[in-house]
Amino acid sequence: MSEPRLRIAVQKSGRLADRSLELISGAGLRVMKGANELLYRIENQPIDLLRVRDDDIPTFVADGVAELGIVGYNVLAEHFPDADLEAMIVQRLGFGSCTLKVAVPNEADYTGPQWLEGKRIATSYPNVLGAWLKTHGITAEIVEMRGAVEVAPRMKIAHAICDLVSTGATLEANGMKATDLVLKSEAVLIKAPHAPAPELAHTYDMLLRRFDGVTASTG
Ligand code: PRT
Ligand code: ZN
């Protein structure tokens, strides 16, 4: 029978993929990029990397398919709007920083959240936006879009958008300006609700200590 192995769910490709691998190598894990695209083995520890879409990471970790995962706080918050996120988060990782913001066309006379009352807002984050609108007592129509949210006002699909912003170049290129901050985000290390198998407890504890050390020294 094969020995049990820990699993860390990481983004397969995208904005968090390289930095996630750097963190893992920084913790002394030697990644074997094998023929299996879904699973990379760690040569020197009983650990595998489960390489998936970032949207699948919260569910895989919550279900215990992977003991740990690296994902954007924004994705986690959207996935589990009612969960105690702090209980899932082991640590903040200091990369992948961005903000989820409301943005409106440059010519709009945005005066504050009240401006959004009765308007249509396009976003890929309906749960996070819905909660934010609720705290401001605003009723607005949320139009869910999977991508290209920034074109929604120009296409007359929505009056405003709520999207991730890092440099602001995308908004600028689309004739929009950022207004209110809805959520601040960065990559976070998350853990499954149950403790790992007893024979993996030592590896698990070692790994958390090392991740903590790497983040402290780079962060
Ligand atoms: O394929 P998969 O589903 O795994 O990836 P994805 O396409 O859903 O996500 P990806 O790789 O684009 O982003 C992964 C994570 O990176 C996000 O969930 C965030 O936590 C983080 N991140 C950091 C960002 C950005 N910065 C960011 N700027 N994610 C997206 N953007 C996009 C934003 O949506 C907008 O379109 O970049 C554009 C704005 O950037 P600026 O610099 O023009 O403001
Ligand atoms: Zn995604």
Image (cartoon, grey):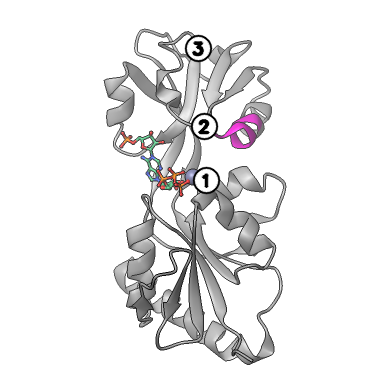
Mark 1 close to ligand 1, CB under 8 Å: yes
Are discs 1 and 2 less than 8 Å apart at CB? Answer: no
Which residue: 38% across, 49% down? Answer: 97
Which residue: 36% across, 50% down? Answer: 15
Q: Quadrant of ligand 1?
A: top left
Say what secondary structure mark 1 lies in.
helix
Q: Which residue is the site of mark 1?
A: 74
Say what secondary structure mark 3 lies in.
loop
**Above or below for 102 versus 7:** above
Closer to viewer: mark 2 or mark 3: 2
Quadrant where the image shows the C terminus: bottom left
* Of residues 201 and 47, the one drawn nearer to the viewer in this rendering: 47
**Above or below for 133 versus 20:** above
What's the amino acid at mark 1? Asn
Q: Position of residue 49 (x, y in %)?
A: 47, 70
* Of residues 198 and 120, the one drawn nearer to the viewer in this rendering: 198
Are discs 2 and 3 less than 8 Å apart at CB? Answer: no
As drawn, is 167 to the left or to the right of 72?
left
Mark 3 close to ligand 1, CB under 8 Å: no
Q: How far, Cα to Cα, is label 3 from label 1?
A: 23 Å
Q: Judge the density around disc 2: few (<14), some (14-19), many (≥20) Cα neighbours within 10 Å.
A: few
Q: Which residues are magenta?
A: 124-130
Q: Position of residue 110 (x, y in %)?
A: 45, 13
What's the amino acid at mark 3? His
- Quick one: label 3 or label 1, which is nearer the N terminus? 1
Q: Which residue is the site of mark 2?
A: 146
- Quick one: label 2 or label 3, which is nearer the N terminus? 2
Q: Which residue is the site of mark 3?
A: 159
